[in-house]
Image: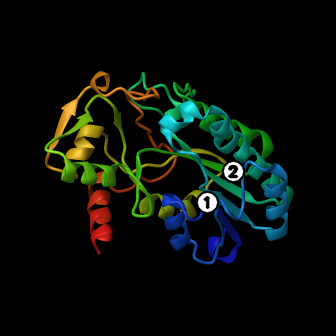
Amino acid sequence: MVVGAIKTLIIGSNGMLGSDLCRVFPDAVKLTHKDLDITNREQVIESILKIKPSVVINAAAYTDVDGCEDNRELAFKVNGYGPGHIAEACSKVRATLVHFSTDYVFDGFRNEYVESDTPYPINVYGLSKLLGEQSIAENSGDYRIIRVSWLFGTHGRNFVETMLKLSSEMGTVKVVNDQFGKPTYTVDLANKIKDILELESGIYHITNDGVCSWYEFASAVIDNAVPCTSDEFPRKAKRPKYSVLVNTKTGPMRHWKEALKAYMKERNE
């Protein structure tokens, strides 16, 4: 697939990941939530039939993990059924669908997960995202489901910005040291999509390299982080202890510490 010569549609173009996707695909048709409500099946099909893209990249999602516990119906509409509507429309115009899922489709009882491992979510967000994966597989034969983790980027709220804000307001910042994953820079993820489009239909794990705890991640950003356990910092949604995604299908991306340096340079310019 010669990506530069095809018509690309980005859904959720003004979000943290969507903004960086727009830089990688500057000629793409770009739709925000105001332009397209992915929970509206008729609107989704009508829009995609009208645009007739060759590639659809869906970066629209409801990503508030704790919020999903309170808004279960909305979570399943946006993260579960919405991607199915997009996949159905893609099938009608023979477009390739790129969709982003999450490490939270796994329960975290193992140290790491490959693409073929059986998902078992432990919170509503993970359940809704798994339904999205299943809805896509049922409605399209040409898709790239990309599971990602711990995203940070300059165009939205993220862990790095939260740590910087708390660090400036508090003497010490408590951060859990018993949940492990792979921080991923949205710029690196967006740049990887053209490579993924050249590969076969299926599920991919794409993260920056290197594993850390939230506390270790925070300590690379601020100097007043202190470790605590998940029991000391209860949240509405259960989090997997180990949500480490292993990429077995493509070349690795740079280490998250290198990516973090690039992020800090970009945000400060």
Measured from the top left, where is residue 157 in percent x and y?
41, 54
Instruction: Please tell me which residue lies in front, 196 or 95.
Output: 95
Residue name at image x 14 percent, y 49 percent: 223
Instruction: Please tell me which residue lies in front, 3 or 70.
Output: 70
User: Distance of mark 2 from mark 1, alpha carbons?
Assistant: 17 Å
Coloration of the structure image = rainbow
Q: In which quarter of the image is the C terminus?
A: bottom left
User: Could you tell me if the residues under marks 2 and 1 are in contact, i.e. CB atoms within 8 Å?
Assistant: no
Residue name at image x 62 percent, y 35 percent: 128
Residue name at image x 47 percent, y 29 percent: 237
Instruction: Please tell me which residue lies in front, 143 or 37.
Output: 37
Q: Is residue 189 visible?
A: yes
Residue name at image x 31 percent, y 40 percent: 211
Measured from the top left, where is residue 91 in percent x and y?
82, 53
Q: Which mark is residue 225?
A: none
Image quadrant of residue 262? bottom left
Classify residue 99 as left or right of residue 267.
right
Q: Can residue 116 be seen in this view?
A: no
Q: Residue 12 carries which label?
A: 1
- Tag 2: amino acid: Tyr
Measured from the top left, where is residue 193 in percent x and y?
55, 60
Measured from the top left, where is residue 114 in percent x and y?
49, 35
Q: Residue 143 carries which label?
A: 2
Classify residue 210 as left or right of residue 13.
left
